[in-house]
């Protein structure tokens, strides 16, 4: 099933600049930058409602925490009184295909008796701090792609390309969307078998994001060439506990590729891990996701040709506070075939559509990937993934919400459905874990190979 171009509305700037080489792409004009304070939001979303009003006008999203919320709690649902508007099942999915991706439709075909979508009122709740909005406007007039699009310069803090002209710029917007300055988190993942049995894999994560620090300098970031540093330790099950991973992600990933190290408890030593990239299977994933599936897409984009297809109105998970709630147990969410749809909220939103096609001289498990990116946050909401036979292979879904104490829009759970094995992996399970700490004070010394060794031995 192909996406009809009639369902897509091309952004005017994409039309005017579509033929410009990414190696020499000019910064957008002052006229385009000015739109970010008028008809567009500071990160490039359309401010107005859609034609029938089913997608409301942007009003800034959530700008204060709900009454009763305390930092450290699982997040209170600001929209808990909203009622289901309609439910999509295998019996009526044909009526809604225009608002679904081919992969989403395939999930109804694969699980006709159990898969469903409860659709609610659309609420444009995504928001970022004012300094991030201002940084995004500043970036719009100066940020450029380098090294064939596999790096950026002259960007800091905000969205690098709020008025994107091609698919590479759009995917960099996802990679560099604001997620705070640093955080620690607990949680884990599970990959249920076809019968629903699973083993929970627990993690302790630490993330430091120099790119997102308020007042960060584009010149300094270019000098250090570091976007973020990530450290992860397995906490359970016992046979894997202590295994650890360290990643240094770079701004120019061709000039200096991603640097990664692993600590193995059996060998009790740290090793370089250059294979932590691209289509290497993800950690303890049963082969159900690739390394670059993490966060819906991460790493160097150099193995694909990227095309900005335009925009589409799509039903995507949004404001998934119920799925995030600590009133649920993991067993309430995980079921055979897919997560429990009774806990998932869908809304209609405008998304950017970006297609990535594998270059003829490179290799990857995925021949084509189509990303559907929320216009209000640049968070990838859904990705349809095709194999080398041009058949749908996997469908990735990010269940997003606003972490309003920051604020930032991010996923609470990412689910990758493998259509061939009829299994899935759910990453980010946190209902029974301590909540994210976005106020964590981390420093570079915590992200060295020595620190990884100490972390693994604890």
Image (tube, grey):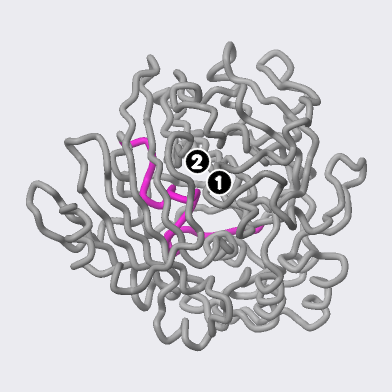
Callout 2: 10 Å neighbours few (<14), some, many (20+)? Answer: many
Using the rendered image of the protein, determine whether residue 18 is visible from the camera's viewpoint: no
Q: What kind of secondary structure does the magenta stretch mostly adopt?
A: loop
Give the residue drawn at x 27%, y 45%: 234
**86 lies left or right of 266:** right
Q: Where does the image place residue 421, in percent across and percent down from the top left?
A: 39, 24
Measure the alpha-carbon separation of dots 2 and 1.
7 Å
Which quarter of the picture shows residue 177?
Answer: bottom right
| Placement of 314 over or under 277, stated as above or below | above
| Placement of 150 over or under 296, stated as above or below | below
Give the residue drawn at x 65%, y 71%: 132
Could you tell me which secondary element the residue under label 1 belongs to? strand
Q: Where does the image place residue 17, in percent across and percent down from the top left?
A: 71, 72
Q: Specify the farthest residue to the left.
A: 267
Task: Report the magenta residues as a range.
Answer: 287-308
Could you tell me which secondary element the residue under label 2 belongs to? strand
Which quadrant: the N terminus?
Answer: top right
Depth check, front residue: 238 or 85: 238
Labels 2 & 1 near each other (Cβ < 8 A): yes
Q: Which mark is residue 414?
A: 2
Q: Where does the image place residue 426, in percent across and percent down from the top left?
A: 44, 35
Q: Specify the farthest residue to the right.
A: 52
Give the residue drawn at x 62%, y 56%: 405
**420 lies left or right of 444:** right
Q: Which residue is mark 1?
A: 411
């Amino acid at each position: 099933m192909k996406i009809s171009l009639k369902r897509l509305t091309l952004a005017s700037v994409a039309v005017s600049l579509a033929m410009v080489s990414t190696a020499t792409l000019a910064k957008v004009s002052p006229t385009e930058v000015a739109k970010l304070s008028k008809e567009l939001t500071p990160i490039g979303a359309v401010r107005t409602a859609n034609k029938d009003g089913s997608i409301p006008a942007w009003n800034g999203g959530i700008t204060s925490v709900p009454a009763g919320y305390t930092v450290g709690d699982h997040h209170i649902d600001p929209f808990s009184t909203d009622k289901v508007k309609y439910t999509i099942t295998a019996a009526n999915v044909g009526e809604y295909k225009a608002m679904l991706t081919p992969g989403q439709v395939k999930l109804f075909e694969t699980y006709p008796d159990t898969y469903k979508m409860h659709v609610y009122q659309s609420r444009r709740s995504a928001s970022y701090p004012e300094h991030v909005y201002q940084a995004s406007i500043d970036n719009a007039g100066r940020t450029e792609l380098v090294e064939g699009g596999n790096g950026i310069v002259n960007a800091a803090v905000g969205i690098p390309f709020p008025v994107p002209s091609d698919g590479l710029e759009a995917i960099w917007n996802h990679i560099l969307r604001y997620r705070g300055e640093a955080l620690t988190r607990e949680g884990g993942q599970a990959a249920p078998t076809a019968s629903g049995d699973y083993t929970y894999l627990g993690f302790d994560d630490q993330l430091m994001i120099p790119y997102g620090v308020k007042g960060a300098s584009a010149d300094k970031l270019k000098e250090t060439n570091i976007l973020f540093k990530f450290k992860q330790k397995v906490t359970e099950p016992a046979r894997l506990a202590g295994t650890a991973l360290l990643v240094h992600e770079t701004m120019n990933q061709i000039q200096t590729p991603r640097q990664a190290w692993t600590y193995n408890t059996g060998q009790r030593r740290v090793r370089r891990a250059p294979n932590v990239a691209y289509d290497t299977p993800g950690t303890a994933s049963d082969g159900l996701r690739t390394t670059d599936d993490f966060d819906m897409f991460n790493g160097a984009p150099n193995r694909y040709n990227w095309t900005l297809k335009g925009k589409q109105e799509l039903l995507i998970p949004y404001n998934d506070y119920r799925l995030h709630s600590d009133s649920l147990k993991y067993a309430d969410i995980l079921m055979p075939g897919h997560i429990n749809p009774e806990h998932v909220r869908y809304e209609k939103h405008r998304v950017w559509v970006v297609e990535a096609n594998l270059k003829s001289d490179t290799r990857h498990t995925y021949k084509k990937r189509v990303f559907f990116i929320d216009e209000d946050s640049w968070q990838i909401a859904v990705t349809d993934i095709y194999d080398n036979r041009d058949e749908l292979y996997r469908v990735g879904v990010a269940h997003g919400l606003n972490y309003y104490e920051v604020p930032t829009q991010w996923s609470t759970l990412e689910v990758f459905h493998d259509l061939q094995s009829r299994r899935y992996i759910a990453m980010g399970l946190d209902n029974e874990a301590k909540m994210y700490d976005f106020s964590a004070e981390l420093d570079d010394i915590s992200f060295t190979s020595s620190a990884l060794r100490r972390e693994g031995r604890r």
